[in-house]
Image (cartoon, rainbow, N blue to C red):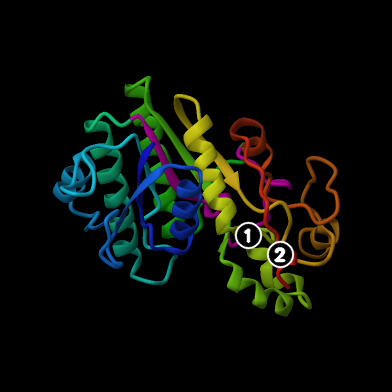
Amino acid sequence: MQIIVTGSRGKLGVGVVAALREAGHRVIEFDARGERGPDSVQIDLTDYGQVADAIAGVEERHSGVDAVVHLAAVPAPGIVPDTALITQNLTMTINVFQAARRAGISRIVHASSETLLGIPMAIDPPYVPLDEAAPTRPEFMYAVGKHLEEELARKLVRWDPALRITGLRFSNVMAEEDYAEFPSWQHDTSVRRWNLFGYIDRRDGGQAVLRALENAAPGYDTFIIAAADTVMERPSVELLDAEFPTVPRSRDIVGRETLLDITRARDVLGYAPQHSWRDYV
């Protein structure tokens, strides 16, 4: 396929672009920054005219694509004021979704977020491991924006039965060089309770996008995307005993397995994380 990836120069975007190219697809990178290249377009995704024009075709870059992967965003709270964050992120997502639909593109994958699950866990989760059945519980404006993006996608696919949009609720994205910091967290379980001790290697994030493009069914669906393990050395049950002792456990928890349940992503998409921080520290 020919695939547009927005936010291609971000931490997750680098992993996604690499995974798609390794699988044999041609990737056209859409980003506000980056070096000039034969498969790269510098674009302001908050400008619908630019987005619609660029998705339809860009001279010497492409004349139409098969799929769009939308990763571009203000990536976290606190970088810009709340109103600017939600305005920019929602505007970019609306523009990309609408322009893709108008161009007849039926395969869209977008970056949702684990933040919808109640991060930073100031209030205990309803149960663990947390899965997609848990009600969304955004606790700050970045997460509210992700909730609204998911709702937008749900409404769009209701109008168009052929459309397939997949929201991947990525955990805390890590590059290989980030793993050097992990040993500093091991003395205090509270340091990483904020997201149930989760993370995702960006290369596995790329694999999840690839599997979603290949295997997602028509309609809209969301999947939690995390590593198979936690960021901690202690067994997951010990982490829960220390930080979430009264939270119900929906099933037996084994070893250091993730507390952000990736069962549906495994079963439906064929996602199979390959990377652990333990292999690099």
Q: Secondary structure at mark 1?
A: loop
Residue 114 belongs to magenta span: yes
Q: Taking 38 as reference, is 278 left or right?
A: right
The residue indicated by pointer 2 is 231
The residue type indicated by label 2 comes to Val
Compared with residue 108, is residue 158 higher up or lower down, i.e. above or below?
above
The residue indicated by pointer 1 is 199
**Magenta part of the chain:** 106-132
Point out residue 105 in the picture as x, y percentages from the top left corner.
30, 32
| Quarter location, residue 239 | bottom right
Point out residue 223 in the picture as x, y percentages from the top left corner.
56, 40
**Distance CA(mark 2)–CA(mark 1):** 7 Å
Q: Which mark is residue 162?
A: none
Residue positioned 85% across, 61% down in the render: 238
Residue positioned 41% across, 59% down in the render: 141
Residue positioned 66% across, 53% down in the render: 227
> Front-most of 87 and 264?
264
| Quarter location, residue 82 | bottom left
Q: The N terminus lies in which quarter of the figure?
A: top left
Q: Residues within 10 Å of mark 2 (few under 14, many from 20)?
A: many
Q: Residue furthest top?
A: 161
Numbered label tally? 2
Task: Kindly check if marks 2 and 1 are in contact, taking CB atoms under 8 A apart as contact.
Answer: yes
